[in-house]
Amino acid sequence: MKEKQTQTRKFLFVSRWGESLDIVNSINAEGNEVKLYIEDKPSKEIGYGFVDKVTHWEKFIDWADIIIFDYTGYGKIASQLRSSGKLVIGGTEYTDRLELDRNFGQSELQKHKIKVIPSKEFTTFHDAIKYIENNPNTYVIKPCGETQELKQLLFVGSDDEGLDVIRVLKAYEKSWGNDFGNFQLQRKVKGVEISIAAFFNGKEFIYPINITFEHKKLFPKELGVSTGEMGTSMFWTKDSPIFDATLLKFQSTLAKDNFVGHIDINCIVNGNGIYPLEFTSRFGYPQIFIQRAGINEPMGEFFIKIASKQNFKINVKKGFQVGAFIVVPPFPYDDKKTFNLFSKDAVVVFKKNGREGVHPMHLKKVNDEWLITGNTGIAVLVTGNGQTMKDAQKMMYNRISNVIINNGYYRTDIGDRWSEDSDKLWSWGLL
């Protein structure tokens, strides 16, 4: 059981899309006062009935003991509030840029003497196609800026000459014209995809650190469109050669910048080395909820300690944690008509009592019933933990079988890759 905390505090959450509802809800359940503001209009209903919602977060700055920004893009205001003496969890202009400007992220990696995969930024499809024709190879298309939120546009090529990437670029040109914005072509490297994540208290990283394996495709065995995320497996560790070779090298830069929050670096690793791909300088979703399933202390206390720059050891469960999203149509696409037809206000039904390990995502609560709202169709995240990956999976899938959501779908293989990935990582000396 989670420990009950000793003192109640006032938490103000400033959310871009309402993604942090589960964290907000758990801090509320610990006996704190919580207010939630959601910026995105179509997501405004998320959280109704769960927590107290506000329409102008700025009015509650003085009221709050701590302010938590759950997304990138708030770096400037977060830094201003910190320097005025507020306890704040959230990015800085520098860490926002690490995530949102891929080129800047890559150049900062190089500046910190970390090797990166060759990549090139383009503003037109024509130039990119010409480049591939002159430099045939396997490439990945990565949208930059705001377009990178549309995860289904990321394309990982498999053709040695880059012919599949050329075909996709031509298709994007037809459908997007000049509205696509900048994008990168990155050389594709084979290996294990792995994320290294840690909390930072304004001065240094807090241990243990978190090792995450994301499952991004819609269907089992990595088939279908990229969704951003369908589920994740993870474990906590006090040391990692990948962490030492990547994030740890940013410790003094982040300290100078007075960054307080969570940062993650996604890498491809193989027998030749560690290749960082991109930063997430905020909570990861669903990463933060699965982390919560592995943290043995109240989340409210945990965030207060980080924001007040305490150095402490995170009290975590041994073993593994896994989580899988249950989603509904039109996920992973935006289609208001389909959402309203199939999914809006659909009820999340529990066969047996007990919502243990079921984390509310884009939901509202009416008469204690969980109803789907928002517009993207992410209903709940279900987590499990255990001494082995198999134990954690078993717990998660047992919990999923207790949840009924009309038209709901989820991946049945979250965590399966671990047996093969762990063998490779051991043999490369990276675990």
Image: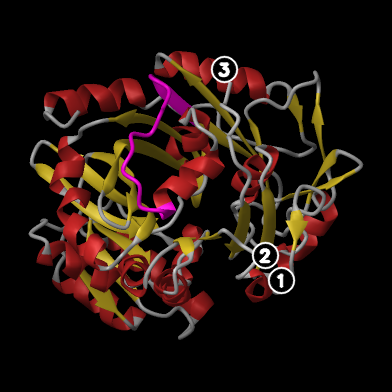
SS state under label 2: strand
Which amino acid does the dot numbered 3 rest on?
Met
Q: Residue at x 20, y 55 (%)?
A: 251
Tell me which numbered mark, 2 or 3, is placed earlier along the sequence. Answer: 2
Say whether residue 312 is magenta.
yes
Compare residues 184 and 275 and report the one nearer the observer: 275
**Which quadrant of the rendered structure holds the C terminus?**
top left
Displayed quadrant of residue 184: bottom left
Residue 194 left/right relative to 54: left
Residue that extends furthest to the front in the rendered view of this protein:
7
- Residue at 69% x, 58% y is 35
Q: Earlier in the sequence, mark 1 or mark 3?
A: 1
x and y percent of residue 378 in the render? Answer: 66, 48
Region of the chain picked out in magenta, as a range: 307-322
Asked whether residue 67 is in view, the answer is: yes
Q: State the mark number for residue 41.
A: 1
x, y percentage for residue 351? 81, 21
Q: Which SS class for mark 1?
A: helix
Q: How is the image coloured?
A: secondary structure
In this rendered view, identify the residue nearer to me: 312 or 318: 312
- The kind of secondary structure element at disc 3 is helix
Distance (Cα) linking label 1 and label 3? 36 Å
Image-based side of 209 in relation to 106, left or right = right
Q: Amino acid at mark 1?
A: Lys
In the rendered structure, does residue 288 fall within the stretch colored magenta?
A: no
Q: What residue did someone put label 2 on?
A: 37
Where residue 3 appears, as percent x and y from the top left, is 56, 26
Residue at point 60%, 41% (across, down): 7
The residue under label 3 is 395
